[in-house]
Image (tube, grey):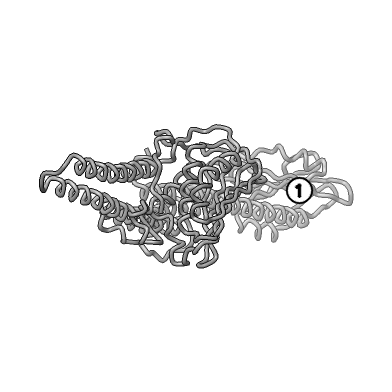
Amino acid sequence: MLDRMPIRWRLTCWYALFFVVAGGLLGAGLFLGLQRVLYDNFNEQARADARLASASVRINGATLQLDPGTVSSLEAGEHFFRLFDQNGTLLTDTSDESELIPLDQVQSALDGSESLASVAVGDQTVVIVSEPIRNGTQVVGVIQTGSNRTDVEETLAALLIGLGIAAPIMVILAAGGGYIVAGRALRPVSQITDLAAGIGADDLHARLNLSLPDDELGRLASTFDAMLARIEEAFERQRRFTGDAAHELRTPLSLMRSQVDLALARPRTVGEYEEALAELDQDLARMTGLVATLLSLARSDSGILTLDRSDIDLADTIELICEQYADPAEAAGISLTASTEPTAINADEDLLIQVLVNLLDNALAATPEGGSIVVKCHPETDGGAHLQVADDGSGIALEHLGRIFDRFYRVDTGRARGQGGTGLGLSICQAIVKAHGGAITVASSVGSGTTFDVRLPATPPIAQVRHRAHELSTSQTD
């Protein structure tokens, strides 16, 4: 039933319950402790009175007699006395209800042992102490004193009534205080709820900015602010991606439209129509590649790419790609070298080839004649693989390094469409490497070249996306 209550009421109920349990234990402990102390003190006083009465007994031969002065002083304190001789015969009895008070302690006192017992007489409790009377070492009688414990029990009863009256009042106060404290403690949660309820696509800049200690609620508030920041960043990235995609698609469409308009402006020969169609085919090929790349990136955003994994030697893959790039590198006057070690890894070879192709295209575009490019790989100690593509070209300025993996971001805007660059190559590389559970990093300085490091783990990531990796088409380079 508590699970269906609001959390504030649940906290209040738990607080009140704990207070009842703690208060009950405290009250019971207080009552029982005080009862024990009062009873012990009363019993000790009863024994002292019995010893005093025993000392006041006068022994004249075989006759025993109580001192009247002592008897008078003790009787004023609600005591009674009984005096027995050594045969257990009752000599003196000052009690009003002697027939209700048992005499079974007399024999143990005649045997030389002091005894104490509590006896209920009507609605009262009487503490009876039986003290042996000695003449030297011989027991010649018994003095028995009785003390009424009514005052002590009335005190305990008053305490019990007071606790009974105070308990519900304290529970009500505790519940009210718990309700107020719970409300104050949960106020940040209410603020989070109100903010979350009012957030729309245009309000992602809103933050709680609560000044809270580093506790559960403080961490909740800071985590919520951090979550909003991530969502805002994702929305902004998506907006930029959509705008950039529209811009990239509009340009080839505009070119194609102008070519069609030009071809239809006047009658042309078959050769001229063929030439116009060939130009349209090139533009269509570029646009088809761009659309395929955008589709692949959009799919990768919905999860991690499903990989067609197999056991491969990364060194063989690098040698194959370097052979294919040997002629273009030689034509550009660039030295292309593969420095590899046997590196066995379970990965999607087609996608890793795509990573290598994009990185080598960028390296060739950034390396001047006479420069060099080195492609390396070696196994890691944990069973993973380390792939590196390094060039000694123009390098990348520091202000660009943080954004080169952003979609549609170009360091060299002059390479734009004429050379096929769309700013998506490195984004594709990053998506592929992340799909393998690895990481890609870059180090560069202007005039000294650029180095891309790709580290792939030995174990494949658990999560996979729904489409196969070979559906990724050849991406556009930066």
Question: Dot 1: few (<14), some (14–19), or many (≥20) neighbours within 10 Å?
Answer: many
- Above or below residue 219? Residue 343 is above
How many numbered tags mark residues here? 1
Residue plotted at (22% across, 44% down): 276
- The answer to whether residue 357 shows anywhere in this view is yes
* Residue sitting at the far right: 137
Q: Is residue 80 left or right of residue 254?
A: right
Q: Which quarter of the figure has residue 264?
A: top left
Relative to 119, say whether 180 is above or below: below
Which of the image's four quarters has the N terminus?
Answer: top left
Residue of label 1: 131
Spot occupied by residue 247 in the image (x, y as percentages of width and height): 26, 54
Tell me which residue sits at (58%, 50%) in the image.
375
Q: Position of residue 205 (x, y in %)?
A: 31, 61
On screen, residue 40 versus residue 158, left or right, reads right
Front residue of 116 and 268: 268
Secondary element at tag 1? strand
Q: Residue furthest left?
A: 266
Residue 346: image x %, image y %?
57, 36
- Is any part of residue 179 visible from this angle? no
**Is residue 309 left or right of 384 when viewed as pictured?**
left
In the picture provided, is 49 more to the left or to the right than 244?
Answer: right
Q: Residue at x 18, y 51 (%)?
A: 258
Tell me the kind of residue under disc 1: Glu
Report the residue at 37% width, 60% height from top.
184
Image location (x, y in percent) of residue 475: 39, 45
Q: Nearer the viewer, residue 396 or 82?
A: 396
Q: Quadrant of residue 195?
A: bottom left
Query: On the image, which quarter does residue 221 sit in?
Result: bottom left
